[in-house]
Image (tube, coloured by chain):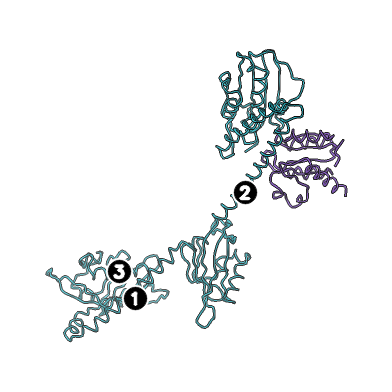
Amino acid sequence: MLVLGEWRLDLDFQLALASSPNPYVMLDHELEIVWMNDAYLRVTMRERDALIGRMIFDAFPSEPGSDSRELLARSLRRVIETGASDELALIRYDIERPDGSLEVRYWSATHTAIADRTGAKRYILQHTVDVTELHELRQLRDEMGVIRRANAVQQQNRSLVDESRRLFDFFEQAPGFIAVLSGPEHRFQMANRAYRDLVGKRALIGNRVEEVLPEIVDQGFIDILDQVFATGQAYFGRQEEVTLIEDQANDARQRFLNFIFQPVVNADGTTSGIIVQGYDVTDEVLTRERQALLVNELNHRVKNTLALVQGLAQQTFTENAEVKASRATFDARLRALAAAHNLLTRESWSAASIRDIVIRSVEAAVGPAAGRFTIMGPDIALPPQFAVALTMIVHELCTNAMKYGALSNAAGRVRVEWDQVGGSDRTFALTWKETGGPQVCEPTGRGFGTRLIRRGFASGAADEVQLAFEADGLRCEIKAELPRQ
Amino acid sequence: MNIEGLHLLLVEDEAIIGFALEDLLSAHGARTTLVANIASARQRLAQDSFDAAIVDVNLNGEFSYPLADEIRATGCPMVFATGYGYVTHPDHLIDTPTVEKPYSLDALLAALSRAMRDHAG
C-alpha cells in the first residue's frame, strides 16, 4: 500500500503500476532507482538487474552540464524539495543501445512526489512517454512550430517558477520579520524565517494568531488586528513592548518591535488579510535605556564632585587663614582629587587599585620626597568612594608629614602598609608610620586634615581610625570594611 | 529660618561634604550629628531624638529611601540632599523637600523650614 498525499487506499498500487503498459520508474530522494515496471525496461532497452540500486544519471549517462541533463536534474530536485509534481513536456534524452551506440530519443515525463508510510522519506515516481516517433513525425510534417511553441510555453513556465522561487527566497531571507495573515480570523498564510525566529518554534501556517500566540491577546494585539481588518487602516507600532512566551521553557521574553500591520485591500475595497512586517529593536531600546541611566549617574557624580569641591573650598578658605597659602593648599587638594578621578576613569569608575592610589597620592603630594617612602601591600580593588576618600586621607597625611612630621627634616622616612584582616577579603587595615622626624605631639586645633584623617572611611561598623603621636613619629591605623559587590 | 538650638541629624557619606555641612549649620547655632552610613544613622535614631534630618540620597552607591521611611516613622521632619534631582524619588517621597548638590545655605534653610512647616501642619 502506498500513501499518496492524505489518501490511503487498500489497493496494491505496485501491482497496478507493474502491469501498466505505461513506463514507470521509482527513485528515492537520492535519485537511486528503487523500482520500475516492465514497460519501462522495454522503452529503455535495459535489464532490471542492471538498473536497480543505481543512480539514475549513472544508469543513463549523459553529458554533465548538457541541457537535457540539467533540465531533468532540476525537475527531480524540485520534486524532492517542494513535494509538488513537475512536468517536462519535452526532453531529449538519448539512450544507449545494447551495442553501446546512442539512440536519439525524445521524452515527455511527469515526476510525482510520493511519501513513504511514515511521511519521513520522499520518492519520485517518474512516468515517461517516449515521444520520439511523434516528434520525428511532426518534424517530418514540418510541424516543428507546434513543438517549438510547446517548448516556449515550457520555458516560460520554468522562468515563472524560477521567478516565484526567487521571490520566495527574498521573502524568506529578508532581515525583517514578515507574516501574511488572511481573513478576519487572522490565519497565518506565510511567515518568513525572521518571523519564525521571533515567535519561537510554533506551527504557524493555517492557524489563527490567537491560537499560536495566546500571550499577545491580553497585550491588545488581536484587537489592533481586528481594527486594521475592519477599517482597512494600517497600524504602525514604534518600539512597542511585546512579551512572548518561549515554547519549551515557558519563559517570558520581553521584546521591543517596530512594525506595521498593513491591510491587503482587494479591488472592491474589502480587506482580505494583513501583512505584518517589522524589525526587532530590542537591543537599540535597551542600549538607549542603559545610556539614560549612565547619563543620570554621571550627572549625580558631577554634582557630587562639585559639592565636594565646594566643601573643600569652604574648609580651606577660612576667615583667619592667609589667602595665598590657602590657595596653594586648595590647588593641591584639587589636584589630589583629580588624580583619584583619573585612576577611577581608567577602570570606568568601577574601582581603583589601593596601591595605585597610595603611590599616586604620595607622588603628587611630596614630589621627590616620595623616595623616602616604603609602600607595600596586596592589590585590593577599592570602589570609587573609598578610592576618593583614601586619596584625600593620604594627601592630608603627606601634607602634615611635610609640615610637622618625618618629611619636615632630611632624614625621616614613612612606611605605608596594608593587608586584609580578620579573615575577610572585605576588611582591610592600612598603617602609616613615620620615623626619624622631629618629636611630634598631638595638635591642639582640629584642622581639616586631621578631621578628615580621624574620620577614616566611616562606611560601616567595622571602621576604625587610630592616631598615635609616638616618640619616633606619627602612627595612623585605618581599618575599613568594603561594601559587598 | 532660625536653626539655633536645633538638633540636626546629617547623613552624608562624603566626608568633605559632611564636614562643610556640619560647619555651616553649627555656625548658625545648630547642634549636629554627622553619620556616614545607614547603620550608624539607625543607631543614632534609636539613641537620640532630632528636630530634623538632612539625608543624602546616595550613600556609598545605595539609595537611602528605606532609611528615609524610618526617619519619617519616628516623626522627624526630613530634607533630601542629592545630585540626582527628584528623578530617583519613589512616589510616596516625591513631596519631600530636596536640595540639589551643590547647595547653598539659603536653599538648605528654605528646605528645612518647609520640612518642619509641613510636619507641623
Pinpoint the chain carrying mark 1. Answer: A
Asked where in the image residue B116 lies, by quadrant, the reply is top right
What amino acid type is highlighted by mark number 2?
Leu
- Residue A135, image x, y percentages: 20, 81
Among all residues in the image, which is located at the extreme bottom?
A141
Q: Which residue is located at x 39 percent, y 77 percent?
A: A9
- Report the mark closest to the observer, 2 or 1: 2
Residue A228 vertical position relative to residue A425 in the rendered view, above or below: below
Sooner in the amino-acid sequence: mark 3 or mark 2: 3
Could you tell me how far apart the alpha carbons at marks 2 and 1 are, in whole angstroms? 73 Å
Look at chain B in the picture and name its colour. purple
**Which chain is tinted cyan?**
A
- Residue B47, image x, y percentages: 83, 34
Pinpoint the chain carrying mark 2. Answer: A
- Residue A254, image x, y percentages: 58, 57
Determine which residue is flagged by label 2.
Answer: A293
Determine which residue is flagged by label 1.
Answer: A12
Left or right of residue B27, residue A121 in this image: left
Q: Are marks 2 and 1 in contact (CB under 8 Å)?
A: no
Viewer-closest of A212 and A37: A212
Viewer-closest of A409 and A35: A409
Left or right of residue A366, residue A21 in this image: left
Could you tell me how far apart the alpha carbons at marks 3 and 2 are, in whole angstroms? 57 Å
Are discs 3 and 2 located on one and the same chain? yes
Q: Which mark is residue A349?
A: none
Local crowd size for mark 2, using a 10 Å CA cut-off: few (<14), some (14–19), many (≥20): few
Left or right of residue A84, residue A241 in this image: right
Residue A125 vertical position relative to residue A435 in the rendered view, above or below: below
Q: Which mark is residue A74?
A: 3
